[in-house]
Amino acid sequence: MDETKEFLKEIGIEDTSKDFQSEKRFKDGGQYRFEVPGIQSPNTMNALLKESVKNNIFIHRVTQTKGIMMLTDEEIEKMVSLAITYGCELFLAVGPRATYDTSATVHTKEGSRIGYRLRGYDNLVYAIEDVKRACRLGVRGILLYDEGLLWTLNKMKKAGEIPLNVHFKLSAHAGHSNPASAKLLEGIGLNSLNPVRDLQIPMIAAIRNAIDIPIDLHTENPKSTGGFIRHYEVPDFIRVAAPVYLKTGGSVATNHNWDTTEKEAIARIKQVKLVKRVIDTYLPDAVASPTDSNYLSIPE
């Protein structure tokens, strides 16, 4: 095995020690940021952001997961406006994917391994059109589920077909969980990686050691992905994975595409507060990315 490990080291992949700590940071110097996923509409986004202001907690990123094609132009424009006013990132998910087309296989136990990837030429075109529409309406963060789509969109960005400042993040549903996959994705244009949800701390450390882009880690999960809560591991997430987005509030939902209500959006802020308490208690020197001064201006 030594020869294999030596070769992996030569290409930038190596094991980490038990006391590994990431020295990498966001450009603003922060080690961690808060992300709340599963916010599917402007009304729930507004409720979430207003509640964060009441609790003096800044949410750095809001993510919609049902798909761009499930939102009207007016809804997208409202979510973009909320993000600008508050000062957070907004990511919308690509709509066409295996569970939305005619695939019967994807709904079987074995076929579920397809994940939310795209099937065929037409669905690739539809997905690109979904992204182009979001970009025209001001969205600059796209949640992807398909590696081929990522490769294609990165080519389009370089060719000027979509804005250069669009950021791509890959969902945990794509199933990536090792440093080689992480390096591949970073190399084809990924800006933020969400590995599978149940990786152990050393596994996360090995991925961080191999790549420079932010890692998105679930601090908790909906019932459909196990329902497990990892709040007490968050200090270790920050220590080994910085720069890291802490994806919090998932336990409020039943599944990935759950239509979060305004009441549930407020409940997600409580979950963020619980995670922040753990950070403040067990890793008080951890540095969060600065808040945007605009966020106090969300209207009541």
Image (cartoon, rainbow, N blue to C red):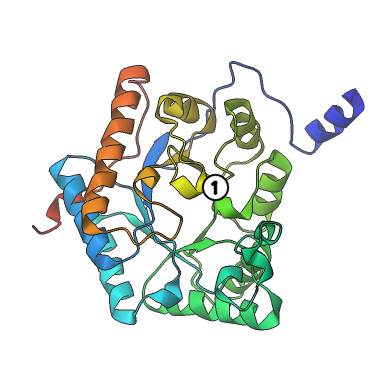
Rendered residue at 63%/41% (across/down): 211
Q: Type of residue at label 1?
A: Asn
Q: Residue visible at 58% across and 16% down?
A: 19
Q: Quadrant of the N terminus?
A: top right
Can residue 132 be seen in the rendering of this structure?
Answer: yes
- Judging depth in this view, the residue of 176 and 264 nearest the camera is 264
Which corner quadrant of the image does residue 3 belong to?
top right
Q: Compared to 156, does 84 lie above or below? A: above
Q: Residue at x 59, y 33 (%)?
A: 204
Is residue 186 placed above or below 244 in the rendered structure? below
Q: Of residues 26 and 151, which is closer to you in this image?
A: 151
Q: In the current view of this chain or complex, which residue is farthest to the front?
A: 108
Name of the residue lying farthest toward the top: 19
**Mark 1 lies on residue:** 194
Q: Residues within 10 Å of mark 1 (few under 14, many from 20)?
A: many
In this figure, what is the number of numbered marks? 1
The quadrant holding residue 92 is: bottom left
